[in-house]
Image (cartoon, grey):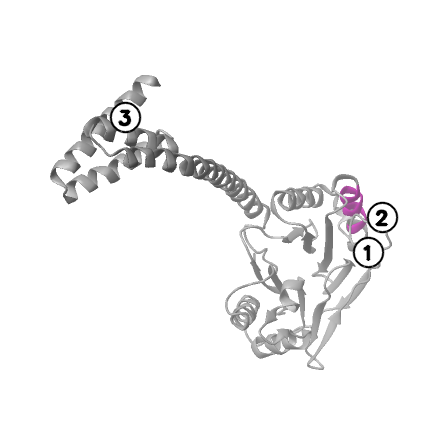
Amino acid sequence: MANSYAILKERYAKILNKYLQEKNEIGLYHAQQFSKKVLEDQISPEEMVSIHAETLTKLCPDLPAELTDSFDFLMEIMVAYGMAYREHQSLIDKQKEFESEMNVAASMQQTLLPAEIPSTESLDIGVVNIPASKMSGDYYHFVKDEHGNLGVAIADIIGKGVPAALCMSMIKYAMDSLPEQRLQPVALLESLNRVVEQNVASDMFITMMYGSYDPREHCFYYSGAGHEPGFYYEAETDEFHELYAKGIVLGITREPLFKEYKKKVNVGDFIVLLTDGVTECFTDDGFIEREEVVRLIRQYQHLPAQQIVENVFYELEKAQGFQLRDDFTLIILKREV
């Protein structure tokens, strides 16, 4: 280390001496290149001032006393500056470490989401899931049983970062491991509630809406755990109705009461599931109303389900100046035949 420091000082003396003699752009270029070496060897600002003062004194031994004394003055300034600089570098290193952890968690989240939308004979399904930042608190999942029943879950985890990603992982694998007889809405939410209540910190909460579509009866059975109500479009009357399901947030109590609801789904009807990032979009004029979401869906309801959700997302993103303030998840299940 000492030898490396001596080599550094010798190199600096050559660069400075050459510049003082020639005073050209090439000398300044060499100085810029030398600064990279200084950073690489983690030479502090006060050390660099000391090297410069020592080198200049050797090169110009007849320097005025005032000039040599000024180096002591500069040294005191650089000591304080150096401490602040090192603290700043420490914060940068911690920020890089945090960003690295966030990237890992974000990648984990992506693997937890469905790789593709499941296919069903009678349903056209559209999904948009966009995080407001690198990490998302929104989650959705599809489950299909041996009878062709399609289960769909949409959840909002009140919490961010790595804990939210781990929580999503727990929910996914809990749902995937449930026996098929437990995939009915109330039974599933009761099972998940036990998992959340026992394993999730008290400062994290999970809201969820879960529904199961039976293609034999064309009925949608659903239950909610404190989640944002969706919508149900009835083609026969050309009306939208609120898809409300009473139920407490997951993990609050060991013995929650969930209620199962049922909707007959006719040809042309569709079900809308969403998170509050859809209904609570904030624009320059304030929060939009739920009626605005319905108006947008109605505007595009003649399109396939995926085009509906994508167009609604675009309109609401545009209304926010293309800057989402909350995670956005919108799912539409549209009966075709």
* Mark 2 vs 1: CB contact within 8 A: yes
Q: Can see residue 230?
A: yes
- Identify the residue at image location x=73%, y=58%: 211
How far from the left and from the top, in percent, is residue 156? Answer: 68, 55
Left/right placement of residue 13 relative to residue 247 reads left
Q: Mark 3 points at which residue?
A: 8
How far from the left and from the top, in percent, is residue 278? Answer: 63, 66
Q: Does the magenta stretch include residue 215?
A: no
Amino acid carrying mark 1 in the image = Ile
In the image, 225 versus 211, the foreground residue is 225
- Identify the residue at image location x=65%, y=43%: 163
Q: What element carries label 3?
A: helix
Which quadrant, please, contains the N terminus? top left
For marks 2 and 1, give the CA distance: 8 Å
Q: Is residue 191 magenta?
A: yes
Mark 3 or mark 1, which is nearer the start of the sequence?
3
Question: Magenta residues, as a range?
Answer: 189-197
Q: Which residue sits furthest bottom?
A: 237
Mark 2 or mark 3, which is nearer the start of the sequence?
3
Numbered mark located on residue 248 in the image: 1
For marks 3 and 2, give the CA distance: 66 Å
Amino acid carrying mark 2 in the image = Thr
Question: In the rendered image of this protein, does residue 182 appear above or below residue 323?
Answer: above
Question: In the rendered image of this protein, does residue 8 appear above or below residue 109?
Answer: above
Numbered mark located on residue 253 in the image: 2
Judge the density around disc 2: few (<14), some (14-19), many (≥20) Cα neighbours within 10 Å: few
In the image, 268 versus 275, the foreground residue is 275
How far from the left and from the top, in percent, is residue 79? Answer: 43, 34
Res. 85 image quadrant: top left
In the image, 15 versus 150, the foreground residue is 15
Judge the density around disc 3: few (<14), some (14-19), many (≥20) Cα neighbours within 10 Å: some
